[in-house]
Amino acid sequence: MATKTVELVRERGLKVEKKYGMTYDEFSKDHLFANYPVVIGDACKDWKAKEKFTLEFFKSNYGDKEVIVEGQKFMLKDYITLMETATNENPAPYPCKLQIDNDYPELIPDVSPRFKYSMPDWTNSKLIPKKFIGGANTLEIFFGSPGGQFPYVHYDYLCLHAFITQLHGVKEFTVIPPNQTPYIYQKKDNLWVSEIPNIKNIDFEKYPLSRNLTPITFTIFPGETLFIPCGWWHTAQSLTSTVSIAQDCLNTSNFFQFKKEVFLNLSKRKSIKAYLGKIYLTIIIALIEILDRFKIKIISIID
Ligand SMILES: O=C(O)CCC(=O)C(=O)O
Ligand SMILES: [Fe+2]
């Protein structure tokens, strides 16, 4: 079956498309290795979560769990009540997240099978020490409400790829290609975060280079998955009450950028452990490259 493609937006030569029935080969060539975003219209079609993950489900089953949203503590049921009454003018703080992989593994079957596009994924590989992945949470649920704005423009920590699947409601995304990084005003201490507070209303006097940015804005709807490749700057805003799943991904396509980011972090520490970490990562990369060159199925070895 041929891929059905719909153009979502085109901005000064850059476009984002929505695709249905895409083969893995097409995804790999035109998006994963081309490092180019796409909305996948049917990736999560077999997930139970589409019906199961309602606000009512979380209120009844996880209502007493504590969540910290923008520094404020809530019981999940109280946050959900806040979501239900939030308006654009008076949004609930955002984002409210549950970490599925660390804290709620019983929910993993509801977001399974993992779609083919996000595999292989080595973020949980035994060969990659947890210390390298650091603060990255690799499978999360996001709750949002009208007006809820992700607090900053960023690319995903350690240059991981992100797959964001919309289960309920509508979310607006703005993405900016990695080659526009010189105009984004990276934070000195967190290079993956931009200093620009509001990408839709930039203070050009304060951030003159940002005139060169071409932010691309579009919306994603229930059942759709946005692929945000490594290094693409992005932010999001809920237009309605929303439930989404975010999943990170690391494989040959972004391993070099990942290595660069981990090296940078390790360079901040001058210990022997950091030095050994760099050597370890260099060897792992060389090994993966050799295996890949000889077309040895690296998936089974590294997974
Ligand atoms: O869905 C969103 O609000 C964006 C989430 C995101 O970009 C992230 O957690 O890195
Ligand atoms: Fe992100």
Image (cartoon, rainbow, N blue to C red):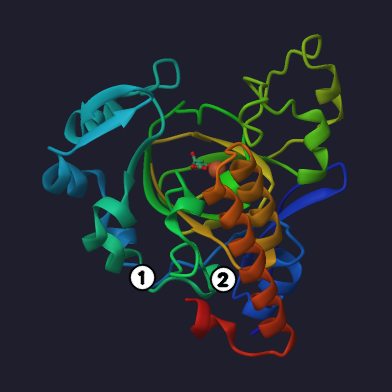
Q: Quadrant of the N terminus?
A: bottom right
Pointer 2 local density, CA inside 10 Å: few below 14, some 14–19, many at least 20: many
Above or below 170: residue 92: above
CB under 8 Å between discs 2 and 1: no
Residue 57 image point, x, y percent:
19, 49
Above or below 17: residue 3: below
Q: Nearer the viewer, residue 9 or 120?
A: 120
Residue at position x 42%, y 44% in the image: 169
- In this view of the protein, can residue 214 be seen by the observer? no
Q: Three-letter amino acid code at disc 2?
A: Tyr
Residue 56 image point, x, y percent:
19, 45
Disc assigned to residue 180: none
- In this view of the protein, can residue 36 be seen by the observer? yes
Total labels drawn: 2
Left or right of 210 in this view: 284: left
Task: Looking at the image, tell me whether mark 2 or mark 1 is earlier in sequence order.
Answer: 1
Residue at position x 30%, y 64% in the image: 108
The quadrant where residue 84 appears: top left
Q: In which quadrant of this rendering is ligand 2 seen?
A: top right
Specify whether tag 2 is near ligand 2 (CB below 8 Å): no
Q: Nearer the viewer, residue 240 or 203?
A: 203
Residue identified by numbered label 1 = 112
Residue 146 image point, x, y percent:
42, 29
Residue identified by numbered label 2 = 117
Residue at position x 65%, y 76% in the image: 288
Above or below 195: residue 47: below
- State the separation of the CA atoms marked 2 and 1: 13 Å
